[in-house]
Amino acid sequence: MTTTTIEPTMDAVPEATLRSALSSRARPVRASALSASLSFGWRAALKIKHVPMQLFDVTMFPIMFVLLYTYLFGGALAGSPSEYLQDLLPGVLVMTVAWITMYTGQALNTDISKGIFDRFRSLPIWRPAVLVGMLLADAARYTMASVVIVTVGVALGFRPDGGPVGVVLAVALLLVFAFSLSWVWTAVGLLAPTPEAVLQMAMTILFPLTFASNVFVDPKTMPGWVQAFVNVNPISHLATAARGLMHGNAVAGDIAWVLAWCAALVAVFAPITMRLYAKER
Amino acid sequence: MPIEPFRNPTLAIEASGLVKAFGEVRAVDGVDLAVPAGGVYGFLGPNGAGKTTAIRTLATLLRPDGGEARVFGHDIVREPDAVRSRVSLTGQFASVDEELTGAENLVLLGRLLGFSRGQARERAGELLDAFGLAEAGDRLVKTYSGGMQRRLDIAASIIATPELIFLDEPTTGLDPRSRNQVWEIVRALVAQGTTVLLTTQYLDEADRLADRIAVIDHGRIIAEGTSRELKASVGSGAVHVRLNDPEQRPEAQRLLTQALGVPVHLESDPVAVSARVGDAAETVAHALAELARAGVAVTDFSLGQPSLDEVFLALTGHPADDTSTADSVDDNDEEDAA
């Protein structure tokens, strides 16, 4: 595609217009932390508006995951696809959202490699606003992915015994976890040399994290050392908690485990991120 | 050049002994500055001289490793927010979001600066009009030409009118018309009372725009003053000859060296040569006659003050466009090293 650029002539602009646009007017009061964060969220939303293909990862991938796993493995693993789906769907939901958290790091790294990041850093604003705004917009993406997955699931025969309230609670817990996990990727995004490197590092962590879990199969048949990992893996706890909430038989212990993991992730990676962010580059 | 009275209210920037090092490389190596408020101040130097690092440090993006600096009396280390609310920086590479439209970029930055949604929209409209971007306002920035991006970039820097604006090589890579537009904008900014600090590797740009110039080489200021002062410091007058055909330059150099009896310098402009001469108009007239006799067509000549090219050569011992010095670091590398 070739774009013809027709440059408007500056000569046509009366000098008075230029002068009046430059004339000093009172500087506004400093933007509040919330307003600055929301502005960054708006920026992320605008990008989706201009390139809707970005939503592919939160719409098409989850649909493919649900369809493939249900019909390929359902019969073998649980007797029938529809029986397998009852357990699989909350797990796939957890896995999908965990995967798409990595794009936060990629977007941050892309910003840094461009001059725009310098401009943001030279503004008199609450410094974490750039990151918080990004995470806010991401929360919207996670919600969208969740809605898609649950809708597809219900169409395929997923019947949550916990009803809509259970589903909403499960998604809420998932969003808390995704927000906490995102701080890992913001730290990676600030450290990695290129956006591609961010994704490679993230995949190296996410593959074992999501597959060495109880998302697809019951860990009982796994060797002991794998079970040991699966049982401390936050994804396993999150998947179990999400199943519990959706089917109305949640165990407080699992939810507590998930929240403890969330607290730990934020406590460790938020300060690291903020330190890296404040560091010059 | 010691700066005794700190907190001088008429100074936009005052710095003493400012140092910024990246590992072994001292990109800024003991810079003293007294930039008066109002007008244009130029940092002139080749790639890797430390110009970018110096203004990034002054704009609070980098933390100095030594010395101190104040911007309108506010310490760049202890009061970064006070500095940030008075200055804005337009980097060497477009610091606007290519994936948004021009208008969205300006509204976003307006909101971040604290304007209400309505005010931010109104301000964006004003600036797009003023910078000849009104029709392009709703197009994605990545479809803009280099000159348009640069103008949007500068517009983004003056949404809330800054007292001091840093322009890092504002015209590098622009065609002559876009360059003239940027110059117009700089002059208009100054007319409204904003102080402009710009970096450039173009000697004629510094000569035309800047009220005062600091010549930077290897992280140090090696000369400072008005263009006239810098030229005068080099001493004697100079003869400049512009040729019709760059092919004939070696021939012209040979003939002029013979006729003038002094070394003849090839300028960065491929059709220009110059030589420092005494006060001998007669010798010069004779030398030009020699050129005419040999069939070397001269389009223009002048006898007068030395050019900044010669100033740079005289001050540093190497021409301004010589980037081959072993320890020079490219401005981009400085960022990578950070």
Image (spheres, rainbow, N blue to C red):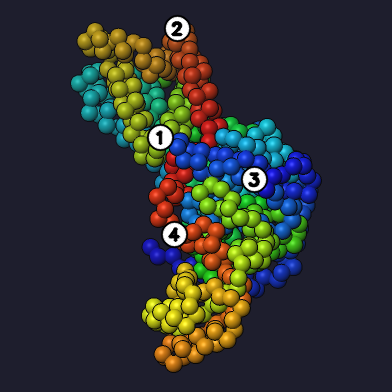
Tags 4 and 1 in contact by the CB under 8 Å rule? no
Secondary structure, mark 3, is strand
The reply to whether the C-beta atoms of the residues labelled 2 and 3 are less than 8 Å apart is no
**Residue at (51%, 74%) from the top-left corner?**
B275
Q: Is residue A198 visible?
A: yes
Taking depth in this image into account, of B228 and A139 the one nearest to the observer is: B228
Residue drawn 48% across and 23% down? A269
Residue A253 badge: 2
Whether residue A169 is visible: no
Distance from Cα at disc 2 to Cα at disc 4: 69 Å
Query: Pointer 3 and pointer 1: residues touching (CB < 8 Å)?
Result: no
For residue B265, above or below residue B335: below
For the residues labelled 3 and 1, the Cα–Cα distance comes to 36 Å
Q: CA distance from mark 2 to mark 3?
A: 64 Å
Which residue is labeled 4 in the image?
Answer: B322
Compared to residue B260, the image places residue B140 above or below, namely above
Kindly give the residue lying farthest to the left in the view shown.
Answer: A76
Say what amino acid the circle numbered 2 marks: Gly
- Judged by depth in the image, the label closer to the viewer, 4 or 1, is 4
The percent position of residue B38, horizontal first and vertical second, equals 74, 56
Amino acid residing under circle 4: Asp
- The CA span between labels 4 and 3 is 25 Å
Disc 1 designates what residue?
Answer: A192
Q: Which residue corresponds to mark 3?
A: B32
Q: Amino acid at mark 1?
A: Ala
Mark 2–mark 1 distance (CA, rounded to whole Å): 36 Å
Q: Chain of mark 2?
A: A
- Marks 4 and 3, the one that precedes in the sequence: 3
Quick check: B115 left or right of B44?
right
Q: Amino acid at mark 3?
A: Asp
